[in-house]
Amino acid sequence: MSTVTDERWPSADSLLVYDPHTGYCNIPLLGAHTYATSVSPRSPIPTPTAIRAVLASYATYAIGEGIDLLDHVRLLDRGDIHEPDARGSLALSQALSRATNEPWILLGGDNALTWHALRALAGPDLAQWGLITFDAHLDMREGRSNGSPVRQLLDEGLPGSHVVQIGLADFSNSAHYAGAARDAGVTLVTREELRHRDIVTVVADALAIAGADGRPVYVDIDVDVCDRSVVPGCPAAAPGGLSADELRRAVRAVAADSRVRALDITEIDVTRDSDDSRTVRLGALLVLEAALGIAKRAR
């Protein structure tokens, strides 16, 4: 992390505030470190704390876009929900029920967060929402775990015809669950397909499906969609996934769409990360990419 203070080089942690700032896009940021129902052992050490801390390593200026986030947005830090898998699930629902003009950025935790958060945001209107996942896995397993949020949401009324899953990997899913997803009407975009298509075009197509008729869209960013070399702190990541750049471009593109009402960043275990914290660092960059996309909505 940077240890030098330079007023001409503001670090991204300066975007974190606790009260709304008039004249800025105030993006609510909430941590919810789900882990208790994970199908693979993981640490209870909260990932959101690590992501907030590593924001200090980055600047606020997107040189390619010519946009300084400091001029446009603030990350309205809503703190962390403790024990979101169990006793904290009510607190998570209450937090997400707060009215906001801007989409939520949610920091997991494992992928169980997607079920908790979308159910809380949608309430009785789940059938009116769409879902986009960036994930190597279908998350269609039985039971309640980080391997089942998509199936749980479908069971509770989320229409499969408005669900798009991007980045599904070979040898990371079963024929049974792939068939169940297709039977439910889910659109599956495999890693093989992504080798022949630009990720931004894929995102545009996914938004057209998930957000048809102007419906609100929830976006799940499971970093195991990436190649394991760039996310060693993700327990289920395998060789051959997306590059960090591909995922960053995808997140920026999806966040720029006004139908997107929440994004989560999941499946980072800080205790498994490399010595250079590359997985947590990617998580922080995804927060900034999402903030940039949201800032571009008004341009």
Image (cartoon, helix red, strand yellow):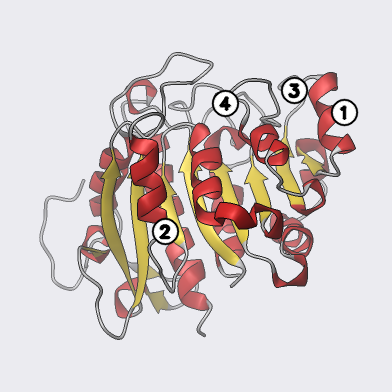
User: Is mark 2 in CB contact (under 8 Å) with mark 4?
Assistant: no
Residue 73 placement: quadrant? bottom left
Q: Amino acid at mark 3?
A: Asn
Q: CA distance from mark 3 to mark 4?
A: 13 Å
Residue 165 placement: quadrant? top right
Q: Nearer the viewer, mark 2 or mark 4?
A: 2
Q: Amino acid at mark 4?
A: Ala
The x and y percentages for residue 189 are: 79, 43
Name the residue located 61 percent from the left edge and 36 percent from the top edge: 225
The x and y percentages for residue 171 are: 75, 19
Which quarter shows the N terminus? top left
Disc 4, SS: loop
Name the residue located 61 percent from the left edge and 25 percent from the top edge: 147
State the residue position of label 3.
173
State the residue position of label 1.
179
Q: Amino acid at mark 2?
A: Ser
